[in-house]
Amino acid sequence: DIQMTQSPSSLSASVGDRVTITCRASQSIDRYLNWYQQKPGKAPKLLIYAASSLQSGVPSRFSGSGSGTDFTLTISTLQPEDFATYCCQQTYSTPGYSFGQGTKVEIK
Amino acid sequence: EVQLVESGGGLVEPGGSLRLSCAASGFTFSTYNMNWVRQAPGKGLEWVSYIRSGSNYTYYADSVKGRFTISRDNAKSSLYLQMNSLRADDTAVYYCARERLVWGSWPTFDYWGQGTLVTVSS
């Protein structure tokens, strides 16, 4: 099974900050990597697919990069509505997709 | 508008059974692969099960294999998860999620239901 490890598990940031979250796969997954945002009590929302493609309707301050085993999600200028938990998902092993444990972005 | 609405959650004793349903609308259900994903209280997301659009292929996480059964009724635009031999560590919010294949082969979960809570406790 492919294990996904995110870092950090949580971070504190201020509105306007640039935030970077890392996701590492236990083996190469090409670019089969999605990012989701989840707010408390809500379902996850797809932000980025195929490592770097922005889902329709998602603000351009969100971006993704990486391939193989190392990936990043970047929020260029943090907005108040971006305080949430972010989670990566590999879809290389089809099916049997696995998620990272999540990164909680909190207000500093 | 795409909608996925789960139901069937509740409190069940260890060893008991429960059947979750997911009612889909706003899209051609029969043409999409579907998944169940769960989230234990305060924990991350865990993929649980997958079913191909034509119901001819299913797949399970090791943690539920042999206890859970995924199925679908394309005529009713509905997805199901039969959960047997439930354990305390099955306690979670269960989401159904639509799988969209970007460019024909890149899976994404583009729509999710609101989730239904399953609590396994005596």
Image (cartoon, helix red, strand yellow):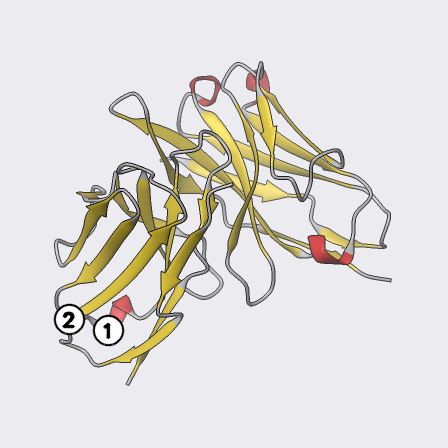
Q: What element carries label 1?
A: helix
Looking at the picture, do discs 2 and 1 lie on one chain?
A: yes
The mark nearer the N terminus, 2 or 1, is 2
**Horizontal side of residue B60 vs A21, given as left or right:** right
Looking at the rendered structure, which numbered label has been put on residue A80?
Answer: 1
Q: Where does label 2 land, which residue?
A: A18
- Which sits in the foreground, A69 or B120? A69
Expressed as whole percent of the image width and height from the top left, the position of residue B110 reads 36, 39
The chain letter under disc 1 is: A
Q: Residue at x 48, y 30 (%)?
A: A95
The three-letter amino acid code for the residue at tag 2 is Arg
Q: Position of residue A11 (x, y in %)?
A: 32, 76
Q: In which quarter of the image is the N terminus of chain B?
A: top left
Q: Which residue occupies 13% across, 76% down?
A: A16
Which-is-in-front pick, marks 2 and 1?
2
Instruction: Residue A67: give its label.
Output: none
Q: Pointers 2 and 1 in contact (CB under 8 A)?
A: no
Q: Is mark 2 on a helix, strand or loop?
A: loop
Q: What residue type is labelled 1?
A: Pro
Q: How far apart are marks 2 and 1 (CA)?
A: 13 Å
Instruction: Name the outermost residue toward the front.
Output: A27
Where does the C terminus of chain B fall, quadrant-wise? bottom right
Q: Quadrant of residue B23?
A: top right
B30 left or right of A32 in image: right
Figure quadrant of residue A68: top left
State the image coordinates of residue A61 (x, y, percent, origin top left): 13, 59
Measured from the top left, where is residue A35 in percent x and y?
32, 50
Please name the residue shown 12% across and 53% down the image.
Answer: A60
